[in-house]
Amino acid sequence: MKLIFISGPSGSGKTTLSNQIIKKNKDGIVLSTDNYYKTGLISKLLSKFVEGFFDRSISFNNKLLKKDFEFIYKNGNSIIDRYYNFEKKTIQNILNETNNISFLIVEGIFAKEFSNTLNNKDYIFLEIKTKKNECMKRVVQRDIKERGKDKKQAENDFLKSWEIYYAKLKPDSIKNNTNKFIIRKKTDIDKIMKKLFK
């Protein structure tokens, strides 16, 4: 099974790129790290008191993502879709069987960290580079609409998330045997597809 990881700061277009790839090659599935945050009372409390909680590793349920990832990788199918509710701090599990999966995309701000936990698996890594002001505009619109924030809070949270994302990146944090591509605004999706599925 082909593995593709898509990383980039909040609002850089990771989900959009994932959907474009899936639209052009329908034999794949996407796991978004946005749907694998921790739930319950601890998450509710920490998100109120820890600045940039949802951009920090302590918020991420790595164990649950690994479980879903390994199941899909081993069996070539998926039986559950997960959706995280940022207001309620809960995960909704929806039964949805997908079979004959030939490639798996993991996208999100924790995609790079998760890829580093894999042993003896080759993968393609796509790093999205988008201007800060463009990312901020997208994130503010999304957070007002989907996450119950006002504009000021959304802007402040974005600036913190940008800072956290780039502070934790290390230039040598990708395996040497990994194919890495930088994706910019004007990158041709068809050229990407040729590289991914040659």
Image: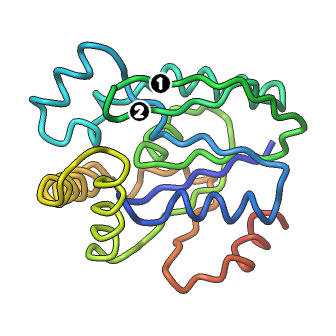
Q: How crowded is mark 2: few (under 14 residues within 10 Å), some or many (20 or more)?
A: some
The amino acid pointed to by label 2 is: Asn
Upstream in sequence: badge 2 or badge 1: 2
Q: Residues within 10 Å of mark 1 (few under 14, many from 20)?
A: some
Q: Residue 53 vs residue 63: left or right?
A: left
State the image coordinates of residue 87 (x, y, percent, origin top left): 31, 33
Q: Quadrant of residue 134?
A: bottom left
Q: Quadrant of residue 155?
A: bottom left
The amino acid pointed to by label 1 is: Ile
Q: Name the residue under label 1.
A: 91
Label 1: which secondary element = strand
Q: Quadrant of residue 79?
A: top right
Q: Mark 2 points at which residue?
A: 85
- Give the quarter of the figure containing the C terminus: bottom right
- Give the quarter of the figure containing the N terminus: top right
CA–CA distance in space, label 2 to label 1: 6 Å
Query: Who's the residue at 49% across and 81% down the image?
Result: 185
Q: Residue 40 vs residue 116: left or right?
A: left
Query: Who's the residue at 57% across and 30% down the image?
Result: 82
Query: Who's the residue at 53% across and 41% down the image?
Result: 115
Q: Are marks 2 and 1 in contact (CB under 8 Å)?
A: yes
Q: Which colour scheme is used?
A: rainbow
State the image coordinates of residue 101 (x, y, percent, origin top left): 84, 40
**Number of marks in the rendered image:** 2
Label 2: which secondary element = strand
**In the figure, 47 relative to 134: above or below?**
above
**In the figure, 133 relative to 18: above or below?**
below
Query: Who's the residue at 52% across and 21% down the image?
Result: 64
Disc assigned to residue 169: none
State the image coordinates of residue 51 (x, y, percent, origin top left): 12, 39
- Residue farthest to the right? 100
